[in-house]
Image (spheres, rainbow, N blue to C red):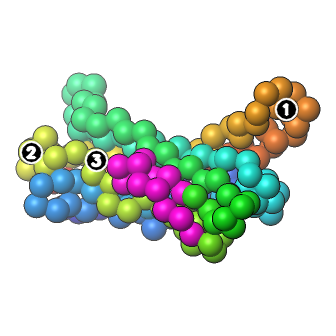
Amino acid sequence: MGLFSSRPAFASDARLTDIVITNTQDYLLAYFSVTDCFTENMKRAIDNGVSTSFTFFVKLYEVRNWWWDKSLANLKVSHEIKYDNLKKVYIVRLSSKDNKVVYVKDFDKAKKLMSEIVGLKVTELRNLQRGNHYQISMMAELDKIRLPFYFHYVFFFLSLWDFETDWYAVDFRY
C-alpha cells in the first residue's frame, strides 16, 4: 500500500496530524491526532463539570476516473470527557473503542485520549480490490457544549469554543 498525499482544505487552529493509514491481515486502519484543540477556557469548563465531546468523521471512497467515486465507508466516532469533582478524575468515553470508559487523574493523559484515533477499523480488506485507487478523508469537530436547562442562553459565548478541523485526505493504492 502506498501513500500519495495528505492535504488540508482550509486553515484553522485545530488540525489533524500524525495521519497513518495501514492495514492488518483483515482490516484497513486509520491513526491520527488532533492538535491545538484544547484552550485554557475549555479546561476550566471541563474541570467545572461541563461535558465535552469530539466527533471524528472518516470516509473511504474508491476513486474512479470515468464514474462517480464509490463510497465504501462513512464512519462517525466520538470521544467524550467529563470531570468528576468528587472523585477528582477525568472520565473519558471512547466510542472508537466500543464505548470503553477510562478514568484518569491527569488532564494531559485525558487530553491525549480525547484527541487521538488509534487503529480505527475503517473497512475489511475484502471490500478493497488490489491495484485500485482509494481516498480516505477525515476531520474532527468539537461538539457544541451542552449545558443543563436554559443555561446555553445565558452562556452564549461558549459557542466560541466550537472548532472544526479541515478535511484531510490520503490517496492510496491497495
Mark 2 vs mark 1, CA separation in Å: 49 Å
Residue at position x 35%, y 35% in the image: 74
**Dot 3 or dot 1, earlier in sequence:** 3
**Dot 2 or dot 1, earlier in sequence:** 2
Residue linked to disc 3: 122
Label 3, residues with CA under 10 Å away: few <14, some 14-19, many ≥20: many
Nearest the eye: 148 or 39: 148
Q: Is residue 77 above or below residue 93?
A: above
- Pick the quarter of the image with the N terminus: bottom left
At label 2, the amino acid type is Arg
The overriding secondary structure of the stretch rendered in magenta is strand
As drawn, the label of residue 151 is 1
Q: Which mark lies nearer to you, 2 or 1?
A: 1
Q: Secondary structure at mark 1?
A: helix
Highlighted magenta segment, given as a residue range: 92-104
**Can you give x and y, in whole percent of width and height, for residue 154 in the image?**
91, 32
At label 3, the amino acid type is Val
In the rendered image, residue 18 lying in the magenta stretch gets the answer no
**Can you give x and y, in whole percent of width and height, for residue 85 in the image?**
73, 60
Nearest the eye: 119 or 94: 94
As drawn, the label of residue 126 is 2
Q: Secondary structure at mark 3?
A: strand
